[in-house]
Amino acid sequence: MFFGLLVFTAIPAIRLINTLRSGVFVDNTGVSGKIKKEQFRYAYHEISSVSVDDQIDNKRLVIVSGYTSHSIRVGNARAVRDAISHNMALLGVTPTPMMTPLTNALHTTDYPAVEITEILKQQIINLYRHEMTGKGRIENFYVFEETPPVKLENAIKNYAQSIGSDEKVVFLFDASFGDSGKSGFVLTSKCLYVKDNLEKATKCYIKNVVKVTEIINDKYDKDKITVELETGNYIKVTMSSGQDQKLAVMRVLDETIRLMNNPQ
């Protein structure tokens, strides 16, 4: 392990390598790290918060940027935390806003449903087919009329009760333990409805969605993707498929929402 601090008014630099698979480096431009095979890099203005889990594990450093968090176990976690905080203060940067999870439905604006024309429908189906090619069959991910009526009925009863008569179901992903359709997500021409097995149901309007991204370097959420909203909130969506399949669903969901928000 190497530990060094530049003197006087210079930016403190810390290099810590715990194992051959993980580590963190702090210098005058930002923070970079490696957790197993995953790498990350943040400039100081991209960091929302940095902390040490003193109550459970005082060697675990947690770096948050927006809604993305990286948890790294390092031998001198407090020194790294203090160096990052010092550098941010010395440079006078404004931390990037920390996004908060959406815990219930958004009712601020009742956006109208998007018209699913035959052209738009075919674009979505082509995207779905393209992303599924070569990824193996993704269990329990359905598009338009391929959605099993029983699963859709269970989804509506359990977490998508507010689907209106003006909404057309685009996708259903069944994440339930018993393949019942009682949890997962339903994307309609108006809203995204989400229910994790152990979480409360929630929804957002597709007009509020900024992007759909992967959650990385978080052992608790490694099987989830994130829906980022323009309101400063986000929704986590559980994916039980393999990595390639998870990324395929993520891309389909992200691009489909973009197509519906910006129809040709």
Image: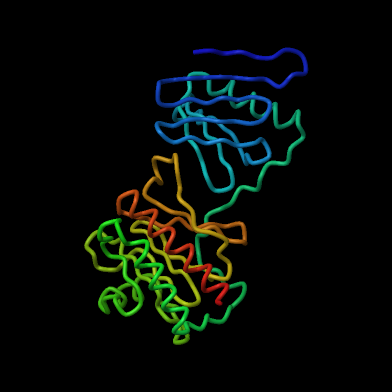
Rendering quarter of residue 137:
bottom left
Seen at 33% across and 55% down, the residue is 245
Tell me where residue 208 sits by quadrant: bottom right
Q: Quadrant of the C terminus?
A: bottom right
At 40% from the left and 31% from the top, the residue drawn is: 36
Q: Quadrant of residue 182?
A: bottom left
Q: Nearer the viewer, residue 57 or 6?
A: 6
- In the depicted view, which residue is nearer to us: 21 or 12? 21
Q: Nearer the viewer, residue 195 or 256?
A: 256
- Where residue 207 appears, as percent x and y from the top left, is 57, 71
Q: Which residue appears at 57% of the width and 73% of the height?
A: 262
Image: 74 above or below 169: above
Q: Is residue 52 above or below residue 151?
A: above
Q: Is residue 252 left or right of residue 228?
A: left
Q: Is 137 positioned to the left or the right of 3 in the image? A: left
Q: Residue furthest bottom?
A: 165
Side of 31 where 244 appears, left or right: left
Residue 112, percent from left and from top: 56, 82
Where residue 65 sits: x, y (%)? 58, 43
Q: Nearer the viewer, residue 21 or 49?
A: 21
